[in-house]
Image: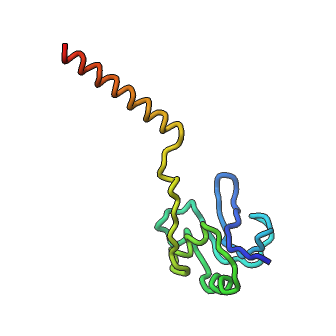
Amino acid sequence: MAMKIRLARGGSKKRPFYRVVAADSRMPRDGRFIEKLGVYNPLLPKDSEERVKLDIEKIQAWLDKGAQPTDRVARMLEAAGVVAKTERSNPKKAKPGKKAVERAEEKAAKAAAAAEASEEAASE
């Protein structure tokens, strides 16, 4: 059984509230879980102590048993100092999309045409 430490969504529409749970990876996101390990309330300010509450001892026990945290939970555990910070690399993140590249090329072409026209006007 592949175990995950992940977020289970609660709360009403437009008012999210998450529980950090240990669950079988085959179960649905908000479905059956084995143990509640903490809570996360994204509506609170980032500097609030109530925003993320984790039971570190339970989480460490599940990690020792082989449970894998999801990316978002792993970031919370890194901030809490439970797991070592991992280096993430997403080289495509900084590259502009197709439309942005096309707009930049059009803008450069217009600027070049304007510069060329101003040079011709200055030479005459």
Q: Position of residue 87 (x, y in %)?
A: 50, 70
Residue 104 in percent (x, y) is at 43, 35
- The residue positioned 57% from the left and 60% from the top of the image is 43
Q: On the picture, is 118 further left or further right than 111?
A: left
Q: How is the image coloured?
A: rainbow
* Residue situated in front as seen by the camera: 115 or 46: 115
Q: Position of residue 80 (x, y in %)?
A: 52, 77
Q: Residue at x 69, y 82 (%)?
A: 66
**Total marks drawn?**
0
For residue 39, which quarter of the picture?
bottom right
The quadrant of the image that shows the C terminus is top left
Query: Which residue is at the far left?
Result: 123
Q: Is residue 96 above or below residue 93?
A: above
Does residue 103 lie above or below 67 as drawn?
Answer: above
Considering only vertical position in the picture, is 50 above or below 113? below
Compare residues 92 and 12 and report the one nearer the observer: 92
Residue furthest top as drawn: 124
The image quarter containing residue 8 is: bottom right
Residue at position x 19%, y 18% in the image: 122
Question: Looking at the image, which is closer to me, 36 or 73?
Answer: 73
> Which of the 4 quarters of the picture holds residue 69?
bottom right
Q: Position of residue 95 (x, y in %)?
A: 48, 48
Quarter of the picture holding the N terminus: bottom right
